[in-house]
Image: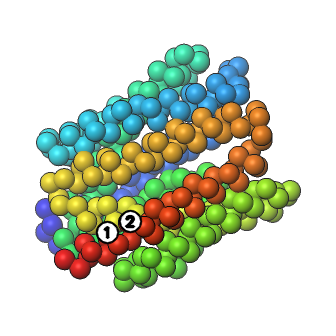
Amino acid sequence: MNSTEKIWNRRFILLFITNLLVLAAFYASIPIIPIYCQEIGITGSRVGIVLTAMSVATILFRPVAGYLLDNFNRYRVYLVFLALFCLSFPAFLAFPLFGALIVVRLYMGAVYSVCGSATMTLAGDVLPAAKITEGISRFAFTVSIGMAVGPYFLVAGMLVSKLSTQKAIDAGRHRMLVYISLAVLILTMLSYLFLNSGIHLLAAGFFFGLGYGILQPLFQAFVTGTTPAPQRGVANAAYMLSYDVDIGIGSLLMGFMQESIGLPLGFALTAIAYAAGGVVYLSYVDGYYRRLRQK
C-alpha cells in the first residue's frame, strides 16, 4: 500500500480530513450533551452517568474493534461503522429520555470504538514504512484539533504546540517533550485552585492545549511506529482504550464533584493523574521505547 515515499500522499490526506471531521463532531458533542440533558430535566450526577455510558461501551468493544481490523478488510469495516456512528447523533433528539440516552451513548461507544481505532490503523497502512512515526505524529493532530474545535481556550495552544515541537518529535527528542508537557499540564490544573477571572480561564485553556497538544500525537506515534502492520489494529484499539477509561472516569467523577467539592478543586486534583503518568513514563516507557529504536 505504500506506493509513495511522501507522508502527505493522497490517501493520507483523505484519511486526515475524514478523521478530523468525525472527531470534530464527536468532541463537539461532549460539552453540548450536559446542556441538552439539563434542558430535558436531567441534572447532577445523572449527566455524568449519561456521559460515562459511552466509555463503558467503548471499553467493552475495543477488543472486538482490534479483531475486526486485523482480520477483515479495514476500509470496509471503517465505512460500515462510520455510517453507523452518524446515526447516533439524530438519536439524541429522537429519544430525549434518561434511560434512552444511556442506550444511545452505549451504542455510540460501541461503533466509535471501531471508527477511532480504524483511522489510526489505516493511516499507518498508507504511510511509508520509514516515516510511520513522523506521519502518525501528524495524523494524531486530528485528535487535538477535534477536541479543540469548540473552545478557542484549547485550539490556540494546540496549534502553537504543533508548530513549535514537530521538528523535535521528528528528531526523536521525545523525553524532553514529555517532561515539559507534563509539567505544563500539572501546573495548569493546579492553577484552577486560584481561578477567579475569565482571563485566567482562557490562559488555563491555552496552556492545557499546549501540553496536551504535545503529548497526544507523541504517544500515538509511539504506539503505531513500534507495532508491526498486522497487529496495528489491536495495538491502536488497546491504546485508545486509555481514552475510553479516562473519559468515562473523568465524566463520572466530575458529575459527582460538581455537587460535592466543586469543579475548580476537581480539576486541580487531576494533576495527580499527570504526575502518576510521569512516574510510569520515567520508570518504564522511556527505556522501552529507546530499546526499540536501537534495534
Image quadrant where residue 84 sits: top left
162 left or right of 229 in image: right
Q: Secondary structure at mark 2?
A: helix
Residue 284 numbered mark, or none: 2
Residue 203 numbered mark, or none: none
Please state the horizontal and vertical placement of residue 251, each as a whole percent of the image.
59, 38
**Residue located at (28% from left, 39% from top):** 63
Q: Secondary structure at mark 1?
A: helix
Q: Quadrant of the N terminus?
A: bottom left
Image quadrant where residue 28 sits: top right
Farthest front residue in view: 283
Please state the horizontal and vertical placement of residue 212, each as a whole percent of the image.
54, 63
Q: Amino acid at mark 1?
A: Tyr
Marks 1 and 2 close (CB-CB < 8 Å): yes
Q: Which residue is mark 1?
A: 288
110 left or right of 161 in image: left
249 left or right of 151 in image: left
